[in-house]
């Protein structure tokens, strides 16, 4: 294997097991190469080395920081796993990967209905 002396400062990508939370199985300076390798490991994700930001995953649900405006930091096919992980991060949301539809927090429309029904109840 060649020397990595000229690689300083170049962005590296890691293939991490367990939806990006587990051990690192592979590291590369090439995002396409890391993505290809990740397809060989079920439940793995590609993240930027030294951060928790996922740049590739194949799971159905993803957890994003800062109300969905921040980076995706976790992904899972089980919504309960995604919700549990989001509960450990302040301001994180769970959304479907394909549609971007929020799973958590619950849309405000349903919360408003509950508040109106509670307000009408006698004290």
Image: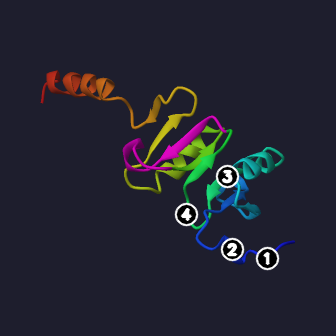
**Disc on the earlier residue, 2 or 4:** 2
Residue 6, labelled with which disc? 2
N-term-proximal mark, 2 vs 3: 2
Q: Which residue is mark 1?
A: 3
**How far is disc 2 from disc 4 in space, using C-alphas?**
21 Å
Mark pair 3, 1: CA separation: 23 Å
User: What residue is drawn where x is 47% and y is 57%?
Assistant: 88
Q: Nearer the viewer, residue 49 or 122?
A: 49
Above or below: residue 17 compared with residue 57: below
Disc count in the image?
Answer: 4
Query: Which image quadrant: the N terminus?
Result: bottom right
**Distance CA(mark 1)–CA(mark 2):** 8 Å
Helix, strand, or loop for circle 1?
loop
Q: Which residue is mark 3?
A: 46
Residue 64 or residue 104, whichever sits in front: 64
Left or right: 61 as drawn, with respect to 110: right
Q: Are marks 4 and 1 in contact (CB under 8 Å)?
A: no
The residue positioned 55% from the left and 63% from the top of the image is 51
Image quarter for residue 82? top right
Residue 2: x %, y % from top left: 83, 73
Question: What stretch of residues is rendered in magenta?
Answer: 59-71
N-term mark: 4 or 1: 1
Residue with the most extreme right position: 1
Residue 10: percent from left, percent from top: 61, 66
The vertical placement of 68 against 7, above or below, is above
Left or right of 35 on screen, residue 66: left
Question: Is residue 70 in the magenta section?
Answer: yes
Which image quadrant is residue 5 in?
bottom right
C-beta proximity under 8 Å, tags 2 and 4: no
Marks 3 and 4 in Cβ contact (< 8 Å):
no
State how far apart marks 3 and 4 are (Cα). Answer: 11 Å
Badge 4 is on which residue? 51
């Amino acid at each position: 294997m060649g020397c990595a002396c000229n690689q300083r400062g170049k962005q590296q990508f890691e293939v991490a097991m367990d939806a990006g939370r587990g051990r690192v199985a592979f590291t590369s300076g090439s995002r396409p190469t890391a993505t290809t390798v990740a397809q060989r490991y079920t439940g793995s994700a590609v993240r930027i080395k030294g951060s928790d930001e996922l740049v590739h995953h194949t799971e159905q649900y993803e957890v994003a920081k800062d109300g969905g405006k921040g980076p995706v930091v976790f992904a899972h096919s089980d919504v309960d796993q995604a919700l549990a992980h989001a509960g450990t991060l302040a301001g994180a949301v769970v959304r479907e990967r394909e549609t971007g539809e929020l799973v958590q927090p619950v849309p405000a429309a349903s919360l408003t209905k509950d508040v109106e029904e509670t307000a009408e109840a006698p004290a």
